[in-house]
Amino acid sequence: MSFTFDSDTKERVRAATDIVDLIGSKLELRRQGRNYVALCPWHRDSRPSLQINTEKQIWKCWVCDIGGDVFTFLMQDEGIAFGEALKRLADAAGIPLSPARGKASGKLGNPDIKAEIYRALAWADELYQRLLLDSREGESARDYLQQRGISKSMVKHFGVGLSPNSWSALLDEAPKHKITTHVLESAGLAGKKEHGGFYDFFRGRVMFPIRDRDKRVIAFGGRVLPGQEGAKYINSRETRLFQKNKQLYGFDLASSAIRKSKQAIVMEGYTDVIFAHQSGIDNAVAVLGTALGNAHLKLLRHYCDSVVLLLDGDEAGQKRSDEVLELFLHAQMDVRVLSLPNGMDPADYLKEFGKENLQQLIAGAVDALEFKMRRVTSGIDPLLDTHRANQAVEEMLGLLAKVPHSGLVSNESFRLRQNQVLPRLARKFSLAEDALRERLTALRLKQSRVKTRYSADEEAPVRLLRPGDLSPFERELLELIIVAPQVAPIALERVQSGWLECDAARQMLDAYQQLEFSGQSLEFECVLTALEDSTLKSLLVTLHEQANAKLRYTKDSAEQRLRVLTHRMGERQDLQRRHQLMSELQNNRFTDEAEIEVLQDVIRQARLRQGLVDQSTTERDPSEPDPGVERNSNKPTDVPT
């Protein structure tokens, strides 16, 4: 267990962030005595089950069995790592970050250049908006937006702008605001010429600012005006702030509505999203020139249960549905597909048919598997076109085979859908269902032989740690030092790491050890702040609550409880060691001489336990480390080598 960031810095950020203010900025809170409760956003909660302890500055949802501190809430809510959560809260509190001793700060990048990039993007955003709204040059862009049916208020709401139709407008103006060419290039606002020099990356385009969840501009999308040359849409190139496959246009404005409705509508165009919001569909967002991917779902699943991919009705939109099929197979949420009729895009459909009709279509959207089934079977006569029929069957079975029967994830709903699809395929193409199942099994076997590699974005969700993952001894030990931190140093001396079976218990004890070595407090709040793994934080909060609930039934002092517990843990370890020795004796693992020594030791230990030998001269407390053995060694103390 090692901490990336300095504990003092983490504690300053935690102390500066009131958990009620943080959670209250995202959820509606209700006072309950000295504490607060809220509807949990991560399950369908009708009775407030998320509890906030104002004294300890912790939160817990007993239904989801997760909890933690201000850092954990942000990590869970937005699907970010500890470092990003710490940075967000530190920025809000105006506290500079300092990494732990011996750790480089490269993970977050150079904070100075990042701050300058943010400033340059905010400056460019303001310049673009001003040019669109107030200049004569912006007249054609204003006409275009008006023709698209976008109101002036929505233009301002989304911050739509216009880039100057010049190769160097930003480059010429930036020095007046102390923005260097290097910063403009790092922000994606300037490009390098082949033979030296720089140029403005965006020229004469309607500009759509792309913002992060903190509403800071991190990139732009530019749309060419009608009648002008160039690619219809271009996005900022990827920078240290912007990765297009991890961002959604309009998410900063749609996140509250997505959370409230438990659903996200994902579109393909910037103007489609703006017009959707203008029409009252304010849970709409757009991908940024990429297919909907795992990184997008990883972001969205912290806010909603289902995603509807709303595709343009043209042929290109139909084909793009294939890109999300595998995503559906392994998704941890409900992913549906809707293709609009008559080749229309969402904005056109809303103008002609209105919000209510579109919402009806969205409500009837089908899952990606059903969408594919309808596509491959449409217009095929199995008697007249056997080749296309065989292709359709193979295509569907090939898709089903990509989820093995054991499953990469628990997917009972998928298996149910599969059992609905196979009989329909059999009926449609006059095939025996058993033959289809045999072919599916063969394809699955073939698929299982292929080594699949997963990117970082495709990793399975982190499994939550629960007290049941710990042994009874480990659970009792951790609960004890949580509520009685004064005995933690004694526990650290007595308990050897070899006594612990669960990796989470070892990591927790290592955290206490590290804090003890550095002379820091071992109080619950300090340990919780020091931990950076959200699953360990959540486990610590659960153990804290359980330990406090047990205190009313416990009369023994913490010291007595620790002495009894470590003695029992030591005895258990000795018993395991004896079983191991006897097994090794039975398998003739020792020389004759060593075997005699081991047998004599086993007999001596047995006589000690039966009181046949004076223990005061021969036996040590199993909970006390053997002075001749290095601490944390798993090697038996009396096995000859």
Image: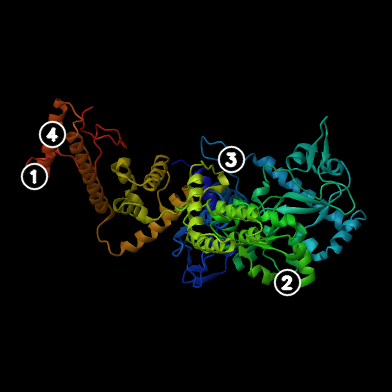
Q: CA distance from mark 1 to mark 2?
A: 85 Å
Nearer-N-terminus badge (4/1): 4
Q: In this rendering, does residue 16 appear at all? A: no
First-in-chain label (2 vs 3)? 3
- Give the foreground label among 4 and 3: 4
Question: Residue 520, percent across and down?
Answer: 43, 45
Residue 539 x/y as whole percent: 42, 54
Dot 4: element: helix
* Contact, mark 1 vs mark 2 (Cβ under 8 Å): no
Q: Pick out the residue farthest to the right.
A: 136
Question: What amino acid is labelled 4 in the image?
Answer: Leu
Q: Nearer the viewer, mark 2 or mark 3?
A: 2
Q: CA distance from mark 4 to mark 3?
A: 55 Å
Q: Which residue position holds label 4?
A: 599
Kindly give the residue lying farthest to the left in the view shown: 612
Task: From the image, tell me which residue sits under label 1.
Answer: 611
Mark before the other along the chain sequence, 4 or 2 = 2
- Indicate the position of residue 329 as horizontal and vertical percent values: 55, 55
Q: Which mark is residue 107?
A: 3
Left or right: where 392 falls relative to 631: right
Q: Amino acid at mark 3?
A: Lys
Which three-letter amino acid code belongs to the residue tagged 1? Gly
Relative side of 362 to 618, left or right: right
Disc 1 or disc 2, which is closer to the eye? 2
Number of other residues with Cα within 10 Å of mark 2, as a class: few under 14, some 14 to 19, many 20 or more: some
Given residues 198 and 150, the one toward you in this image is: 150
Report the side of 162 relative to 319 (left or right).
Answer: right
Q: Tell me how far mark 2 sits from mark 3, CA to CA.
A: 45 Å
Q: Examine the rendering and report whether any part of residue 558 can be seen.
A: yes
- Of marks 4 and 1, the one in the foreground: 4
Q: Earlier in the sequence, mark 1 or mark 3?
A: 3
In the picture of the structure, the residue carrying the numbered disc 2 is 355
